Amino acid sequence: MPITQTTDGNGWGATTLGALGEGPGFRKVRGEIDVKEMGVNAIVLPPRYQTGIHWHERQEEVYFVHSGTITFCFGTDAEPYETVEAPAGSFVRIDAATPRSMRNATTEEATYVIFGAQGGFVGRDGCAPDGTELGRAGGPLDATEG
């Protein structure tokens, strides 16, 4: 069943960017699909637009550029900027205390997703239902499967 609106089931939730709002702006993903262990948001930046500078006290963030190109700027107006240009498909990790802002210097909308959390790393803890080693349980679909 294709996702066309926010929906959930027993232990899962799903939504689309369009279900969270239209046009440029901030999309609160976490609450919409009941994420409990990390922050998740999406931002659609209009052409030729930049965000304000911000940082966090405890939350490391990972940004995924979904569409367009985002220029990440590190620093404040009082110090030299470092920048990195991130095209669609890029991941950028930023320490909590690092000042950052994002720019869309292009003539098209650009969308990125932000994942944020504090605390430690949980190692690979996935389980397969029949004891099969993870990574070996999958395989190609046959011609009758969607």
Image: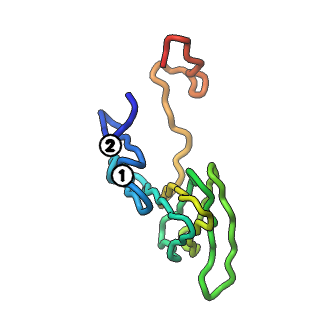
Whole-angstrom CA distance, mark 2 to mark 1, is 8 Å
Marked residue nearer the N-terminal end (2 or 1): 2
What residue is drawn where x is 48% and y is 65%? Answer: 59
What residue is drawn where x is 61% and y is 62%? Answer: 70
Amino acid of disc 1: Leu
Q: Residue 17 placed where, x, y %?
A: 42, 49
Quarter containing the N terminus: top left
* Extreme residue in the bottom direction: 78
Q: Residue 99 placed where, x, y %?
A: 57, 75
The residue that label 1 is drawn on is 20
Q: Residue 122 placed where, x, y %?
A: 52, 47
Question: Do residues under tags 2 and 1 come within 8 Å of each other at their CB atoms?
Answer: yes
Q: Is residue 100 above or below residue 13?
A: below
Q: Which mark is residue 6?
A: 2
Instruction: Identify the image quadrant of residue 94.
Output: bottom right
Q: Is residue 115 above or below residue 129?
A: below
Q: Residue 106 placed where, x, y %?
A: 62, 64
